Amino acid sequence: MAGLNVAPKRKEIYKYEAPWTLYSMNWSVRPDKRFRLAIGSFVEEYNNKVQVISLDEDSAEFSAKSTFDHPYPTTKIMWIPDAKGVFPDLLATSGDYLRIWKAGEPDTRLECLLNNNKNSDFCAPLTSFDWNEVEPNLIGTSSIDTTCTIWGLETGQVVGRVGGPGVAGHVKTQLIAHDKEVYDIAFSRAGGGRDMFASVGADGSVRMFDLRHLEHSTIIYEDPQHRPLLRLAWNRQDPSYLATISMDACEVVILDVRVPCTPVARLSNHRACVNGIAWAPHSSCHICTAGDDHQALIWDIQQMPRAIEDPILAYTAAEGEINQIQWGATQPDWIAICYNRSLEILRV
C-alpha cells in the first residue's frame, strides 16, 4: 500500500488490527475528536471488551486510548450525538443491558446501567438502540422480549465540574412493538426529530411509532416471505426514506413512508447476505451497504423510483466478510468497516 520513498500524501485507507474479532463499532461525534471510534469485541463468552481508538494524523496510525471490560459482546455502540461538544463525553453500549460510559484516557468508567426488568432474575438481551440526535436525553432500546423502551437520561450537564452529578436514567415508556423479537430501532428526523421512531423485528415488519400517540402504530412494510428484518436506517437528510434488510438476504430494501408497503427501490448487487447499511450524513441520495461477499458498495439512489442497477463505488475487503459499516456524521468523507479483527476507514 504505502509506496517507498514517496512524498507523503493523504492516505485513502487506514487500518487497525484489534486483539479480538470485531462486531460493533461507531464514530465519535464530537468536533474535537476527529478520527476517534469505539469498537466492541465478539467473543462467545461472558468476558468481552470495548476499546476507544484514535487515529494520529501525523503518524497515520491508530492507537488504543482506552480499553474496558464488557459483559457479553456489545450488540451496538454509539457516542452521544453531540456535534457541538457541550455534553459530557459519553458513549453507550447495548448487550444484556444498556450501559452509559464516560470516556476517558486511559480510564473509561461506567456511569450507569439501565435495566427495565426489576423483578426478574433473567434479562431479555437488547438487540440494538438509538440515541436521539435532537434530544440527546432520549435513548430507545429494542429487545428480544418484543418490546422497545424509551429511556430519559439526566446527564448532569455542567461540563467540567469534578465529581458532579453522574448520569442517571428513567423509563419514559415501554411498549410491545412487535409480535416477536425486535431487532432494531431508529429515531426519525420527521416532525421535529424528537418523537417518531421505527422498529423492525422477527415478524418481518417495519413499524412506525410516535411518542405522543403510542396507542397505535403504523406498519410501513412487511416482508413478503415473512423473513425477519434485522436492521433499519433512516435517510439522514430526507426523513421520508428508510432502508431495511431481511435475514440472509442479498438485497437492501428502500422504503418511502408516504407509500407504505411497496419498496421504492431494491439494491441487489451483493453476492452474499447484507450485514450493514449506512446513509450518507451529508447527502439524501447516497447509501452504503456491506455484506458477507467482502464488499462495501456505495449507491446513488436519486433515480428512484427508476431501478437502481449498479453501485457507483465498490470496495472489497479481501480478507473477510464485512459485518459492520458506519458513515461518520462529522467525517462525511470517511466510511468505517469491520471484518475479522480489522477496522478500516476508507476515504470516499
Image (cartoon, rainbow, N blue to C red):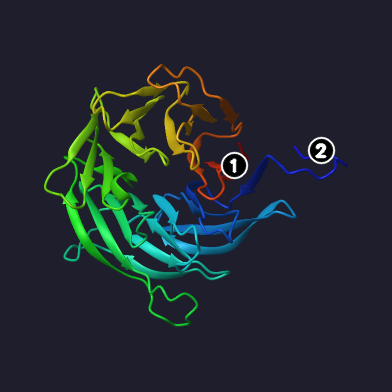
Amino acid type at circle 2 is Gly
Residue at the front extreme, as displayed:
192
Q: Quadrant of residue 238?
A: top left
Query: Which of the 4 quarters of the picture holds residue 244?
Result: top left
Q: Position of residue 200 (x, y in %)?
A: 27, 39
Residues under labels 1 and 2: Cα distance?
23 Å
Q: Is residue 316 visible?
A: yes
The answer to whether residue 97 of the structure is visible from this angle is no
Residue 270 sits above or below residue 46 on the image: above
In the image: residue 42, left or right of residue 249:
right
Residue 50, labelled with which disc? none
**Image side of residue 137 versus residue 146, left or right:** right
The residue nearer to you, when weighing 5 against 237, is 237
SS state under label 1: loop
Is residue 218 rendered to the left or right of residue 281?
left
User: In x, y percent, where is residue 125?
Assistant: 29, 52
The reply to whether the C-beta atoms of the residues labelled 1 and 2 are less than 8 Å apart is no
Image quadrant in which the N terminus is located: top right
- Classify residue 239 by image quadrant: top left
In terms of sequence position, does the residue under pointer 1 or pointer 2 come before the other? 2
Q: Nearer the viewer, residue 242 or 117?
A: 242
Viewer-proximal residue among 305 and 81: 305
Instruction: Specify the label residue 333 is tagged with.
Output: 1
The extreme left residue here reads 215
Residue at x 43% of width, y 76% of height: 158
Q: Which residue is mark 2?
A: 3
Q: How busy is the neighbourhood of tag 2: few (under 14 within 10 Å), some, or many (20 plus)?
A: few
Dot 1 amino acid type: Asp
Q: Residue at x 24, y 30 (%)?
A: 221
**Figure quadrant of the C terminus:** top right
- Disc 2 is placed on an element classified as loop
